[in-house]
Amino acid sequence: QIGCGAEGHSDDRIAAAAFNGPHGLCVGPTGYVYVADAYNQCLRRVSKLRVEEETEGVGIVMGEVDTAAGSGEKGMVDGPVRTAKFCYPHDITASLDATLPVLFACDFDNNCIRRIFTHEGECETVTTFAGSQLGSSGHKDGRASDALFNHPGGIAMSDGGEALFVADTYNQCIRMLYRDEESVWQVSTIAGSPGEKGFADGFGDAARFNDPTGICLTDQDEVLVADFSNSAIRLLSFNSTTSRWQVTSLVGKKGEMDKNGLIKGVGGYKDGPASEALINRPHGVCFDHRGKRIVIADCFNNRLRVLSGGIVSTLI
């Protein structure tokens, strides 16, 4: 257990530390776990866990939690980690490549992506990497410094660190950050139509999402998205023939069109074949590289679900 279960902000041993609305997390290349502690307006760090034995021979998992970046006050301030400010950071990612000593965080209410430079696991400096320096929302592709986001809720990095994928929640689309031929970071919308909710598979801007949040990569460099308000898990695959990203639905059912012409997914709870299974407002998704399965944080069902071999089951 990491966290005492009580709302608060205290650095301590893992069982005694307090969090306040932890959202996303990632494992860094040095083995530390970093957590986006949203309502504490900061990033936390969990030390490498170790097993210690008591006198009776029973092993106890030990570790510590500290504050990695953020003053604990809402705001948008770059600089040294102790004085930097966030506004409801929702997710965080890192490369497992030790030669890339950086973290990237979705700063939800600041409508931007923050970059945190690290050294041997210690966070040192926070900068605004992509999005408005003023926290302005909107939708704009192009140079990372000129791009606009609207409450980005999820972020994932490719293994080599050459690309970042962002679930741009209120823009209802998926964005990709990459370096161009001159090594300048660019932002591109690869799926969804900005500001248009819906539930539709297809290529690029023909696809529709409804509040995409969690995001991760598979071992095939495909992108998995927890499509929150559609109660669905979506898959993005790059089609080399069309040079476009194709969106398909792995789990989730379409509902009827409402009076406003909007088609949303149907939430529920049902295990079984993916084509028949139901989930309810998934907030996170991850790919289990060892087990080759997809793990889903099924938020409104208060369960962890697993998709493996075309079958959805309940893990916890």
Image (cartoon, rainbow, N blue to C red):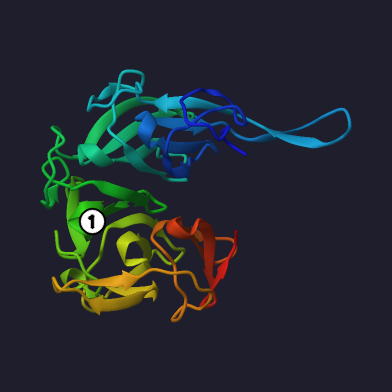
Indicate the quadrant containing the C terminus: top left, top right, bottom left or bottom right: bottom right
Residue drawn at point x = 31 percent, y = 23 percent: 73
Residue drawn at point x = 33 percent, y = 50 percent: 154
**251 above or below 85?**
below
**The one of 279 and 214 positioned closer to us in this rendering:** 279
Residue drawn at point x = 41 percent, y = 35 percent: 37
Q: Quadrant of residue 172?
A: bottom left
- Residue at far right of view: 56
**The one of 72 and 62 positioned closer to us in this rendering:** 72
Q: What number of labels is visible?
A: 1
Query: In what element is the residue under mark 1?
Result: strand
**120 above or below 281?**
above
**Left or right of residue 65: residue 156:** left
Task: Return the residue at label 1.
Answer: 175
Where residue 68 appears, x then y in whole percent?
Answer: 43, 27
Where residue 220 appears, x then y in whole percent?
Answer: 43, 67
**Left or right of residue 144: residue 51:** right
Residue drawn at point x = 14 percent, y = 59 percent: 195
**187 above or below 18?**
below
Where residue 8 appears, x then y in whole percent?
Answer: 46, 27
**143 above or below 56?**
below
Quick one: label 1, few (<14), some, or many (20+) residues within 10 Å? many
Does any portion of residue 193 appear in the rendered image?
Answer: yes
**Left or right of residue 57: residue 184:** left
Where residue 116 appears, x then y in whole percent?
Answer: 34, 32
